[in-house]
Image (spheres, rainbow, N blue to C red):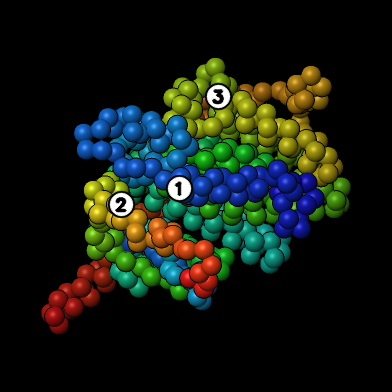
Amino acid sequence: MYGNDFSGEDPPGGLLGEVEAAEAALRAAAERGRAAAEPGADLAAYFAGIVDADQKVEPRDWMPEAYRRTLIRQIAQHAHSEIIGMQPEGNWISRAPSLKRKAILLAKVQDEAGHGLYLYAAAETLGISRDELVDLLLSGRQKYSSIFNYPTLSWADVGAIGWLVDGAAIVNQVPLCRCSYGPYARAMIRVCKEESFHQRQGYEILHTLAHGTPAQKEMAQDSVNRWWYPSLAMFGPPDGDSTHSAQSMAWKIKRFSNDELRQRFVDMCVGQAEVLGLTLPDPDLRWNEERQSYDFTQPDYDELMRVIKGNGPCNRQRMEHRRRAHREGAWVREAAAAYAAKHTEKEKVAA
Amino acid sequence: MSQQHTPLWEVFVRARRGLAHTHVGSLHAPDAELALRNARDLYTRRQEGVSIWVVPASDITASSPDEKDAFFDPAADKVYRHPTFYEVPEGAAHL
């Protein structure tokens, strides 16, 4: 997953290894079993027992209402991000530099749609309908990741999105494979396994450009310069300002704080950037022997807040596009429903 | 608007010949044929299966709201259904 390792083998301790470990832990937790709650038992204590034992809460289990609401919000935003995330890259499908790159990019964007659908399905197990979820996105009452409100100005941006944006997403998502809510954890395992192809294809694009002509290398560097800080901002506000973190950690929805994950991402990227021969745009980036981590410049959180509030470079364009696509697809949904209804009618008559 | 009536389908995939169909997730589709095609696009993009079943979620009858309860109790006190319940005398082979 990192560096120039394209062999398909993940080094020990790599993120794919962690996904495998999370999957093994999920199976092991299932093996440990758990007796059903006795009639009249304290359901809150039963729920807490499942979470404490690192077992999975399943759709039909009792759960605190706030746990349910938190999960719906988080999973829905995640699903919306996958769907809106198709746009910045979709922008380059028709202009990919070769048939190979075009086929890869098509497959990647199709994966994003798939990830959105896995996640919508996971959210629906919590008792909210797909129509409500779609409506929450289209009406702007639920958000998607702010990163997708930045424009893709050059082909290198497709590479930078794969390397940095998908890379940051993976660092965020791998711990979610151990989330206490079963359907979300299982969806994340599937997503993470597929996501590593996305990161590698992006890295390969940048590697190719960075070892091409000076103009190509410059395009790659310009792209990294623009995507670095927005990618760091993907981990959310600093821990001190993060509103949902403490409770989500206690419920084991979240496993690490925003700042911990951001640091982890920076530490991974430095070596990868060196192999690319590109520079991360942070003059203060340096190894801290004492912390055994890199010191780095924080992203502009005021900018993050502006983008979240709807004033990023492409917010309106992204939402308008999604609304239009939904509207223009209405006739397809209606035709399919009419066709299904007609055949149900025929079966009834025949029966 | 028409989505209001798009039913939910549960999807089962047989990974390879010789294995049982396993539940992999769910999706929305207006009819069985589209459910199958959507399931192919959603759950087998990487050759994860050789066969798919789709079942309307509304046609599934579940045993109980809590997944595990008194419904399964009758099996709990019948350890004699397991071979390990029986002591095999010393020297008895092929048992």
Residues tagged 3 and 1 counted as in contact (Cβ below 8 A): no
Callout 3: chain: A
Query: Which of disc 1 and disc 3 is earlier in sequence?
Result: 1
The residue type indicated by label 3 comes to Pro
Q: Position of residue A289 (x, y in %)?
A: 82, 22
Give the quarter of the image for residue A98: bottom right
* Residue A346 relative to residue A153: left or right: left
User: How packed is label 3: few (under 14 Cα within 10 Å), some, or many (20 or more)?
Assistant: some
Q: Nearer the viewer, residue A75 or A53?
A: A53
Kindly state the secondary structure of the residue where label 2 is placed.
loop
What's the residue at 14%, 76% (across, down)?
A: A348
In this rendering, which labeled residue sits more in front, label 2 or label 1?
Answer: 2
Callout 1: chain: A
What's the residue at 30%, 69% (across, down)?
A: B31
Q: CA distance from mark 3 to mark 2?
A: 50 Å
Kindly state the secondary structure of the residue where label 1 is placed.
helix
User: How packed is label 2: few (under 14 Cα within 10 Å), some, or many (20 or more)?
Assistant: few
Question: Residue tagged by mark 3?
Answer: A237
Residue A192 seen in this snapshot: no
Q: CA distance from mark 2 to mark 1?
A: 18 Å
Same chain? Circles 3 and 2:
no
In this rendering, which labeled residue sits more in front, label 3 or label 2?
Answer: 2
Q: Tag count in the figure?
A: 3
Kindly state the secondary structure of the residue where label 3 is placed.
loop
Same chain? Circles 2 and 1:
no
User: How packed is label 1: few (under 14 Cα within 10 Å), some, or many (20 or more)?
Assistant: few
Q: Which mark is residue A157?
A: none
